[in-house]
Image (cartoon, coloured by chain):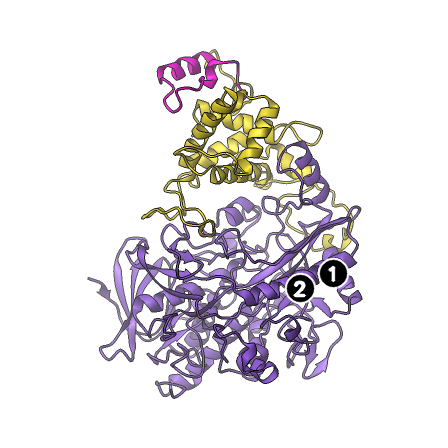
Chain colours: A purple, B yellow
Amino acid sequence: MAKKLKEVDLVLVGLGWTGGILAKELSAAGLKVVALERGGMRTTENDYQVPQVRDELRYVIRHDLMQNTAKDTLTIRNNVSQEALPMRRLGSFLPGEVVGGSGVHWSGHTWRWTDQEFKVRTMYEERYGKKYIPADMTIQDWGITYAELEPYYERFEYTAAVSGKAGNLQGQIQAGGNPFEAPRAREYALPPLTPILASEMFTAAAKNNGYHPFPRPSANASRAYTNPDGSRFGACQYCGYCQRFGCEANAKGSPHMTVIPIAMRNPNFELRAHSWVTKVLKDSTGKRVTGVLYTNTLNGEEFEQPASMVALTAYAINNVHLMLLSGIGQPYDPVSQQGVIGKNYCYQTGASATLFFEGHHFNPFMNAGGSNATMDDFNHSNWEFDRAKFGYVGGFNVGGGFNTALPIGYRPVPRGTPAWGKAWKAATAKWYQTAMNVSASGSVMSNRYNYFDLDPTYRNAFGQPLMRMTFDYKENEHKMGTHAAQVINDLAKSMNPTSVNTATARTEPWTVVPYQSTHNTGGTIMGTNPKSSALNKYLQSWDCHNLFVVGANVFPHNASYNPTGPVGALAYWTADAIKNTYVKNPGPMVSA
Amino acid sequence: MKNDGFDRRAFLKSAVAGSAVAATANIPPPAQAQPTAAQSASTGGYAFLNAEEAAFIEALVDHMVPADALTPKGTDIGLNVFIDRALAGGWGKGDRLYMQGPWKQGVPSQGYQLPMTPADLYRSGIAAANVVCVKSYGKSFDKLSEAQREEFLLNLQAGKVTFDNGPPARVFFTTVYQSVMEGMFSDPMYGGNRNKAGWKLIGFPGVIAVHHQNVEKFRDKQFPADPVGIADMS
């Protein structure tokens, strides 16, 4: 029998960026907030120090900061006719599992997603007609606008020390930035990072080809910085160990050194690490949640934590899993297309070429998480680009540079090089420092057959069903990937490298290995009505008005951009809605 | 490591004979023949590998990373030690591996689906590889000529070798290959990359902390890397 604890105002399930933002904002507003985090406490001072943190084997290969799949994982299949099997170890994506979550080990790439995403169906239908969108493509408008979110993007960017160059300040196009971005009220918090050779060569080539390259905005502080909350950042050291690592310099915007410690100084807030939530509890009407059930994983003791509000703020996938385990909302069925929980799971695709240049020194070990130049010419932001010629929905960004090119994982050699022996060694020695990548990250549009539900067979360490992921790339993504590969290869050729491993589109089934991207979206999507979405525009459950679900799980489709910009902005947006509207008059903030 | 009067070779000989060479009876026990790399390299002993496995791994890492002007050979930079420790430690024993059934083979896109830990995969895979080598060449892998080793490994890599009633040969190969690369390029404190030989090969500086100035200073210039490991800074 679970021990029942004293009721609090808000319980947070998971403590990374979204939980940290809600914890700080709402404890400051006077609410009693408890955060339950599966993982353990980690701090920069204790855990992310040099030299220990510079360990590729521990952090990249053995997944030290990541979810432990021995305890909880997903089952995976490409289509409904396959039998799903467990993802027995991590590969394609890497959810974090410590205080700070994936916000500790991210690279910091921060984008503003715009109305071309939020109004995606309307815009395509207006421009290309209803028939242009494939019948099984379940894209829909998000129910929110860029103008509503703009101040919250800024808040997140200034909190996380995003370094970049504005391309559009209040409608005025700015030299050096992304000319396709939506207008922003202010410049970035910090100027761009120092470019590296690979990003400079990419920039020159992109300009020569008539494109519009710019330094990739990233939460890597280009110089020492104190954010508006008083959190202090060191300057980025271009150490080359960014993605998958905590930052010893506190130069990477992360929740464990910004919002979380501020919340922890507030007596209204309490963190309970090693606390595994198994269920969100509902009252007898099913219209309200009453708290959560969780287990202290240090001793097995089970607790009920009553709360007037619950916010799911874990990794996107785990938020969806907990909704399904708790029986909140109607599970999605791909055959009847009824139900919403599990709907519109999306991922990302991409293509990449390696360019070899005799005589150049790229120093691939000397970079920030965001040491890239990139271009948005074929992305949704550039609505001038006519996709009809290529027949797809969506877009991609193309970039050149390095991010965490460590030697167990990154040792480029020209195709056809032997995999071992003297010739392999000679080629590895020759090309490690004399190669660079040009790569694309591409969107994935939602499809009726890409979704989550509970697995009928496999269980986690708590005896609960694993979540089942059914996902594959569809023809739309194959067409886009083919175009992206062509753009990359043309660019690469124009750079006149000694040799090149050309890019190809991903047209094989999606596979759980190797690593591809921790940009999993959808499953409890936001929208304009409860028939087609799980949450309203304030990320409030249509079914239980005192339940909020925050993370990339709310995205109705996936753009090519990194998701953390809108994830952070939406967390601030939701915190404001709770603080300014909901607590004064608890109930649905949008009428169904 | 000195033997201090203890005749390791004689001990191994009697130990192997006494165990009746359990796994693969048709293979001449490696330790009974001429001295293997295990006996010439100072490994400090093995925590996981048995005699047959040690001979296989030593031969494999020396074949994949032969001595030349660029690096010493695999056993001389500790790749066998790295693999042995990895297998004896958490990774080898299935740390972070979901090990609940039911077990199905699945399709390649579903990833690793074997009902065993990496250590068990090595154990069964080495035994099965030696069975194939004996069938094809009349000798276990460690006794093959360089050309025969090369041919066998290329066939294994290409999926042309199958293990009857054993683990999938390709999964075994990719696991072993990944281990060799991990041993060559991970921090030396894990037993491989001895004297930072792997890092020196490519000019990787290791755990160097500060490039804030270097990023501009060494743009398109060679960085004078004298690699530093975790132990050097601890």
Quick check: is A217 in the magenta stretch?
no
Residue A85 in picture, x, y percent from top left: 38, 53
**Residue drawn at x 53%, y 57% as measured from the top left:** A105
Disc on res. A398: 2
Residue A219 in picture, x, y percent from top left: 60, 65
Q: Can the viewer see residue B89?
A: no
- Mark 2 and mark 1 in contact? Answer it, CB < 8 Å: yes
Query: N-terminal of the two: label 2 or label 1?
Result: 2
Residue A154 in picture, x, y percent from top left: 59, 76
User: Which residue is label 1 attached to?
Assistant: A491
A564 lies above or below A368: below
What number of labels is visible?
2
Q: Amino acid at mark 2?
A: Val
In front: label 2 or label 1: 1
**Chain for disc number 2:** A
Disc 2 crowd, CA 10 A, few/some/many (<14, 14-19, 20+):
many
The stretch of residues the image draws in magenta is B9-38
Quarter-of-image position of residue A34: bottom left
A52 lies above or below A33: above
**Residue drawn at x 58%, y 58% as measured from the top left:** A506
**Chain for disc number 1:** A
